[in-house]
């Protein structure tokens, strides 16, 4: 099992190219199940979750061609030859549930294993099922699988989500494109990845309006066709690397970065003392006057502060001037990185969904263990600010969400290497 070794090495300078969004690509890829024509995706991130999705789609009948060092993928599903998404693949990744809506819409039946993939909370699929029920789907949950059918095809319907679930919005959106009549999703998620999916579906011939707002309207069409689409910039990778020069000092330009993808996050960083400038190539970030100031953070659905940047923000605030309060409102169990940061000398108190971080002058390098994807990179960030050597174990989580993380940090002057523990 690999580990990553980080040594505090002073200020960071340079440029980092930001990849396409994992959470967008994992949503765009199942859209191939809606059409018999090829779908071509560009700017695809090179991650293990992408490989898992390729494996899943191939098991359903999709022909997959990976080119340009993994950054271009052609998906061709002339026919869905298998309507069961098996546990052996689905257990690796929660996004696998996103094949349910497209298969139902195109074929009228599907069986999908209840997903696994993460340790940050229950994240039930009930909202996915209720949304599809509003379109006429029928479900039977047995033996760990969701068995779904729509014997007469899906029909337009309205669903008012009690919570703005991103995944449930995506499943509803894809399924409704081929439903007969008009479908309306209320309290829809507004994330950029939703808009990216809608853009692809429109390129395929879907009739969609209102994406990016709380109410999306879909006029069903008889058939969708192929399209070529670039994956939107990964706002979570962007936000993660924006924190590096604020933690270690220096100035870094994030190529392809866009402020509109992370406005609430940028505002918090500026309150803390960051200088963020939009350039022709992306976003340039530095600390205005040395040490960052404490700031309170509450995670919220987009356009609020992203839960996927909470762990990384906590790493920054460990050495901030003053006391910060982080409130996690999206997932339970998402402060598992706090005890590991405390091993490095951080002063953190956790009570339920709230963490209070009192900044210390300096963190100390230590052996730490990653508990999930975002926790992994938060510990690397903390290592950039620590005295001595930080050894982060269980970094296989990183491969699910960050491509070439060692190369990107090394490119701006960080002392970081990945080692194999045999």
Image: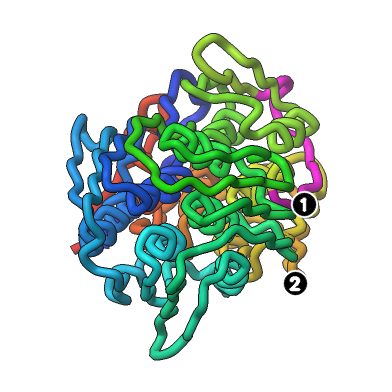
CA separation, marks 2 and 1? 14 Å
User: Quick check: 338 above or below 206?
Assistant: below
In the image shown, does 271 or 227 lie closer to the viewer? Answer: 227
Task: Residue 361: give x, y in percent of width and height.
Answer: 69, 43
Q: How many marks?
A: 2
Q: Which residue is mark 1?
A: 298
Q: Are dots 2 and 1 in contact, CB under 8 Å?
A: no
Q: Is residue 225 magenta?
A: no
Marked residue nearer the N-terminal end (2 or 1):
1
User: Quick check: 354 above or below 42?
Assistant: below
Q: Which residue is mark 2?
A: 352
Helix, strand or loop for the magenta stretch, by majority: loop
Side (left or right) of 34 relative to 134: left
Task: Residue 123: give x, y in percent of width and height.
Answer: 58, 70
Element under disc 1: strand
Q: Image quarter for residue 209?
A: top right
Question: In the image, what residue occupies the spot 69% across and 62% down?
Answer: 159
Question: In the image, what residue occupies the spot 61% across and 71% down?
Answer: 130
Task: Residue 106: give x, y in percent of width and height.
Answer: 38, 58
Q: What is the span of residues highlighted in magenta in the rendered image?
A: 287-301
């Amino acid at each position: 099992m690999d580990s990553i070794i980080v040594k505090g090495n002073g200020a960071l300078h340079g440029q980092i190219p930001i990849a396409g969004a994992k959470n967008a690509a994992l949503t765009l890829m199942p859209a191939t199940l809606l059409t018999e024509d090829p779908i071509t995706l560009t700017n695809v991130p090179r991650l293990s979750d992408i490989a898992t999705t390729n494996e899943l789609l191939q098991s359903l009948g999709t022909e997959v061609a990976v080119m340009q060092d993994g950054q271009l993928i052609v998906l061709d599903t002339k026919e869905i030859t298998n309507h069961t998404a098996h546990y052996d693949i689905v257990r690796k990744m929660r996004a696998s549930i996103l094949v349910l809506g497209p298969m139902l819409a195109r074929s009228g039946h599907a069986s999908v294993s209840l997903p696994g993939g993460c340790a940050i909370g229950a994240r039930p699929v009930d909202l996915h099922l209720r949304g599809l029920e509003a379109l006429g789907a029928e479900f039977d949950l047995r033996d760990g699988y969701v068995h779904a059918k729509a014997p007469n095809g899906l029909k337009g319907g309205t669903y008012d989500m009690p919570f703005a679930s991103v995944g449930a919005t995506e499943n509803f959106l894809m399924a409704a494109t081929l439903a007969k009549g008009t479908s309306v999703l209320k309290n829809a998620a507004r994330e950029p990845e939703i808009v990216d999916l809608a853009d692809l579906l429109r390129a395929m011939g879907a009739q969609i309006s209102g994406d990016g707002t709380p109410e999306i309207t879909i006029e069903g069409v008889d058939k969708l066709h192929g399209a070529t689409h670039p994956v939107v910039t990964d706002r979570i990778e962007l936000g993660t690397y924006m924190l590096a020069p604020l933690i270690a000092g220096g100035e870094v330009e994030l190529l392809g970065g866009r402020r509109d993808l992370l406005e609430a996050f940028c505002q918090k960083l500026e309150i803390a003392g960051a200088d963020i400038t939009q350039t022709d190539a992306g976003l340039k970030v530095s600390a205005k006057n040395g040490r960052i100031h404490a700031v309170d953070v509450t995670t919220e659905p987009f356009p609020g502060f992203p839960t996927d940047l909470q762990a990384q923000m906590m790493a920054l605030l460990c050495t901030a001037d003053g006391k910060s309060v982080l409130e996690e409102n999206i997932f339970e169990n998402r402060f598992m990185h706090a005890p590991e940061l405390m091993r490095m000398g951080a002063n953190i108190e956790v009570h339920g969904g709230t963490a209070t971080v009192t900044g210390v002058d300096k963190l100390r390098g230590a052996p730490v263990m990653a508990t999930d994807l975002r926790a992994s990179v938060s510990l690397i960030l903390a290592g950039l600010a620590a005295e001595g050597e930080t050894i982060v174990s269980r970094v296989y989580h990183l491969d699910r969400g960050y491509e070439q993380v060692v190369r990107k940090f090394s490119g701006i002057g960080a002392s970081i290497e990945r080692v194999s523990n045999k």
